[in-house]
Image: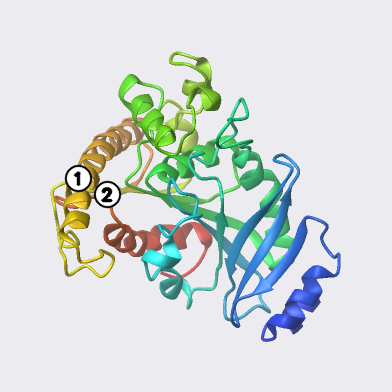
Amino acid sequence: MLAPFAVAAGHPSAAVDAWSAGTDPAIVRATPDGDRRVRLLVHSAAMAEDITVDVQRPADTTRPAPTLYLLNGAGGGEDAATWEEQTDALEFLADKHVNVVVPVGGKWSYYTDWRNADPVLGVNKWQTFLTRELPPVIDRTLHGNGVNAIAGLSASATSVLQLPISAPGLYRAAAAYSGCPQISDPIGRAFAVTVIGSGGGTASNMYGEAGDPMWAANDPYVHADQLRGLKLFLSSGTGVPGRYDTLADPRLDRELLTLLDQEAVGGTLEAAVNWCTHNMADRLDALGIPATVDFQPTGTHSWGYWQDELKKSWPVLAAGLGLPE
């Protein structure tokens, strides 16, 4: 089934015809967005739902390519707080020989498998979707070579360390920007409860009440030894306003209230994840697991910094993907 994709690479309408012809029953629909981007609708049996997945293909689709899974933050890409809207990440990755896969959905879910359906957030089996259901589809339909890396920010920076532990061998590199990997201790769990609650969800539906073993079972800090062998990148700021915390930042609405919110709320969040990230770096060091870390002296919990960190992490991700820097 690879031939139709190679032939149709420069013709989005032909690619849609190929994808829609029933060649892979997991793909419900494919909609082109320019020459190299396509929006897939992929069925998840685990969630009994069709999931939107945005893809950017490499310029040369005749050669197999590795895949970078790029996760959005707590909003799951269902709002304007996305890599595409807030950064130049896709432009930066456009000249790399890599399939860039960005799932859309999973807001406030931490991209994990929840123990219960949530009255507000519904059924969340994102770990199953991202590790079992989606990768084979991507490899079959996008000429993937089976080599994967994953990167995420904020809430999904926890996920990108959880997912490699849950699926050993699936990913070869992971980059976590401004996340809190230790979710089972009181402070880390309180952070997760706050994040999930801000979206109307109930954290006990994810891993149970405080002290439930499921929290520790899904804690990347607790199971950091299982990250051995991955290329790892961790980063965070301190919460102190930095170069992007100014009205000159085009991401802001140029309103003082918005800037104050970024400095106050974003500063507090970044200070919290900075503590978590330092702890994770220390844990990896104690285990003798190499990791590239970038701790900045300033910076709030905001997109300008994450754009920079993605670019700084590229050599680590590229090494895992078998690509040149």
Q: Can residue 182 be seen here? A: no
User: Relative to the observer, which residue lies in front, 101 or 280?
Assistant: 101
| Image side of residue 308 versus residue 6, left or right | left
User: Relative to the observer, which residue lies in front, 174 or 24?
Assistant: 24
Residue 309 location (% of width, % of height): 31, 58
- Could you say which disc has been placed on residue 225 in the image? none
Residue bearing the label numbered 2: 301
Q: Residue at x 65, y 45 (%)?
A: 129
Furthest residue toward bottom: 10
Vertical comparison of 39 with 152: above or below: below
- Could you say which disc has been placed on residue 267 in the image? 1
Q: Residue at x 21, y 40 (%)?
A: 268
Between disc 2 and disc 1, whose residue precedes?
1
Residue at mark 2 to residue at mark 1: CA–CA distance:
6 Å
User: Relative to the observer, which residue lies in front, 76 or 181?
Assistant: 76
At label 1, the amino acid type is Gly
**Secondary structure category for the residue under label 1:** helix
Q: Residue at x 75, y 75 (%)?
A: 16
**Secondary structure category for the residue under label 2:** loop
Given contact means CB atoms under 8 Å apart, are the residues at marks 2 and 1 in contact? yes
Furthest residue toward top: 211
Q: Which part of the image, by quadrant, shows the C terminus?
A: bottom left
